[in-house]
Image (tube, grey):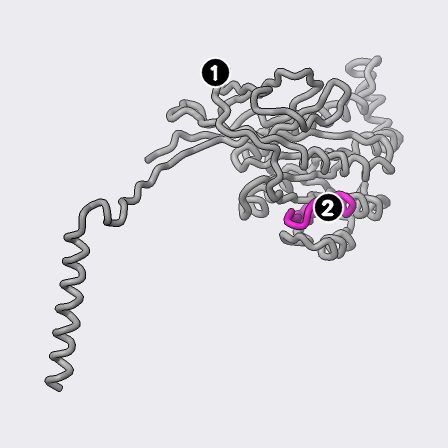
Amino acid sequence: MVRFRSGVVLISVCWLLTIQSIRSQPASDSVPPTFRVRANFIRVPVTVFGPTGKLLTHLEREHFSLLDENSPRAIENFVLDQDRIHVALLLDVSGSIRSELKQIAQAALDFARSFQRNDRFSVITFSDRVQVLRDWTSSQRAIRRALGKLEPGYRTAMYDALWTTANKQLSRVSGKKAIILLTDGLDNESIQSYDQIVQRLIETNVALYIISRTRLIQDEVGRSNRVEFLNRVMSELVNPEEDFVEAYFEQKERAMLHLAEATGGRALFPERLEELTDRYLELARELKSQYVLTFRPPAESDRKFRTIRVQCSEPTGKILHRRQYYWPSPRF
């Protein structure tokens, strides 16, 4: 027993001498101190089309300039983005889509197949409620199985579906994120508003791309007895020269166009069901041909949503990027 206590004392003395030796070493041999520096940068995905509508993928940093609230900002970093992307395939399955489910499922599957193995997808449907058919996966088989479960619903809660997808599905992942929304755009059930959705998509850095079926269903809707009657009444009461069905659909298309472009995406309006696959693949090419510009925001701001504008010195037809970013002043 005495021997054991002597050993403990000896070990303790050796340990103290070792600590003292470390403390007495010159500062140059000691472990360097660790400093924490908070650096905040804003990422701006940018898609550039030439005058003929062709994607431009040969541009360099010097071709771009960026304005933040009309003030020039230095572009800190510039890349052609090849990072992994999380894509939520958000499908409107309200009543008007019943006869098109097979074509829609195939078009969405062809879209997913055009990406790389490290890209991930989630399949979500909505009518009057939102349903996640498949959580995040890179498996083509899993995506195909999920798309095989499409079932038609009734009413259309498009804004609520976007809200749920941004808040619950895409908030769980980081990096490049996008929603590919297929819809007729005729929201008649949502609690969330247009303005709330715009703000939330900007806050969560989600790009929204819309493939709208408005032009596929407009004639059918206009021919229904109820709509024909309402259109005739409105024309007699307000303006006999105006087609109110056409005006209604134009208003819906403008809303979808502005919603998508505010987030850096865009809206497409196929006129035939056979065009769905081509429109999906068109968006796939765009998502894989984006530049990312990075800049440093101001240290202080009296605005939580700041406006940005990207310019290109090369001849272009169109530049897509989100028009605002969310920036509450950082607190250290």
The residue pinned by badge 2 equals: 112
Residue 68 image point, x, y percent: 49, 20
Looking at numbered disc 1 in the image, what kind of residue is underneath it? Ser
Badge 1 density bin: few <14, some 14–19, many ≥20, Cα 10 Å = few
* Magenta segment: 108-130
Quadrant of image for the C terminus: top left
Quadrant of image for the N terminus: bottom left
Badge 2 density bin: few <14, some 14–19, many ≥20, Cα 10 Å = many
Can residue 87 be seen? yes
In-image side of 249 versus 33 (left or right): right
In-image side of 34 versus 194 (left or right): left
Residue 71's mark?
1
Residue 117 forms part of the magenta stretch: yes
70 in relation to 13, above or below = above
Determine the residue positioned at 58% across, 29% down.
195
In-image side of 101 versus 37 (left or right): right
Residue 121 image point, x, y percent: 66, 48
